[in-house]
Amino acid sequence: MQGFYTGLVMAVFMGSFAFGAEEASRFEANGAAVLGGDFIFKPTSREGEVSFLVRKLEAGLLANVDKQGQFELKFTSADERTPKAETKKFLVLLEKAQLGLFSSVGTFSMGLVGHPWSDRQSKYIDFEFWGDSSKPMSARFKYIGDSDLGLTWKREFDNGGQVQLAALNGEENRKDEEGARKDLMLVWDQPIANGGIGLGVSYGGYDGYSPASEKVRILARGHAPWGRTRFGFEALWAQDSADAATTLSLAEGVQLSSDLPGQRTTAVGESLWWLYELSDREKIFFRLDDLNPSREIPEKGLRVYQAAYSFQYSDSVILALFYDQLEKQAKHSTSSPKSEKAGVTAKVSF
């Protein structure tokens, strides 16, 4: 935990040193903490187990650079621990370190940049209260990451629409890549009335998984209001090396390499969610995910059921109760076919 706060202090200090006088740069610091506890129903080996967790800590710094750009720095700490029991600590990740430069044709960003698809996801639905399993389907099952090393171009239109083009390493924010293959992605978002739609296409490849080395993503999402209700969807079509999908634990660790050695596999998934405002402070949320990580092999699918209740305790604090169930088909993997948990969580923003 100490490393997290040390990183934040260093970030502020280095930002002040690098950008100089106040008139040349204005800073905005922000952060969030997500805390809570889980009660495990399944798998049976963990039935009745109670875990108290620091689900996530975030700290960020945004600096305007000479009125011609912005520099964004973001640290994330999750409930992950270092392997050695005698020195266990919360791991700290640098999630973003990107410089954005404004121009008449759009904003160019470079460095450790937010992923073009997931970076805008909160505009559609912001209900990630209980860790990685509450992320949107494409991120929960690791088909899309949170950030990556690369370059992006973003253009915003007068009608609120936005288009992004990115060239990324394809290794997310945990690893550098020295191989030749990269990912190219195009994302388009368009508001419609009080809702919106989005489309994303990505093409890249894996190093070391020839001949079936292509990595393709086609994504769609949308949301719309109806009275006090808001509903939406996310759809995924993905093509990967079966060996890479197994090695990288896509789709909750689906086992594909023994069935399709050296071959491609195609995943198809749909996610539907529904949000209802009980009052100005209270909301209920339901979600259903259905993912087939390999159309070539039957009985590898996954299904997720989620329900949650949230209460806006204050402007900065949200309290929530949730239920999360994951079911795996018979041939998915050797892990438990069902996981089920409920919990309480609190999110504070500052």
Image: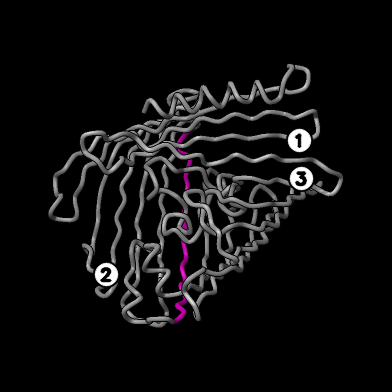
Residue 7 location, x and y as percent? 48, 28
When asked about the image quadrant of residue 84, the answer is top left
Q: CA distance from mark 2 to mark 1?
A: 47 Å
Disc 3 packing (10 Å; few <14; some 14–19; many ≥20)? some
Name, please, the residue furthest toward the front: 178
Q: In the image, is 112 to the left or to the right of 164?
A: left
Q: What is the quadrant of the N terminus in the image? A: top left
In magenta, the rendered stretch is: 263-279
Q: Earlier in the sequence, mark 3 or mark 1?
A: 1
Q: CA distance from mark 3 to mark 1?
A: 8 Å
When asked about the image quadrant of residue 321, the answer is top left
Q: Earlier in the sequence, mark 2 or mark 1?
A: 1
Vertical order, 325 against 292 (above or below): above
Residue 277 in magenta stretch: yes
Q: Mark 3 sits on what residue?
A: 107
Q: In the image, is 258 to the left or to the right of 277?
A: left
Residue lying at 56% horizontally and 67% vertically, measured from the top left = 217
Disc 2 packing (10 Å; few <14; some 14–19; many ≥20)? some
Q: Amino acid at mark 1?
A: Gly
Residues tagged 3 and 2 counted as in contact (Cβ below 8 A): no
Q: In front of the other: label 2 or label 1?
A: 1
Q: Mark 1 sits on what residue?
A: 69
Q: Main secondary structure of the magenta part?
A: strand
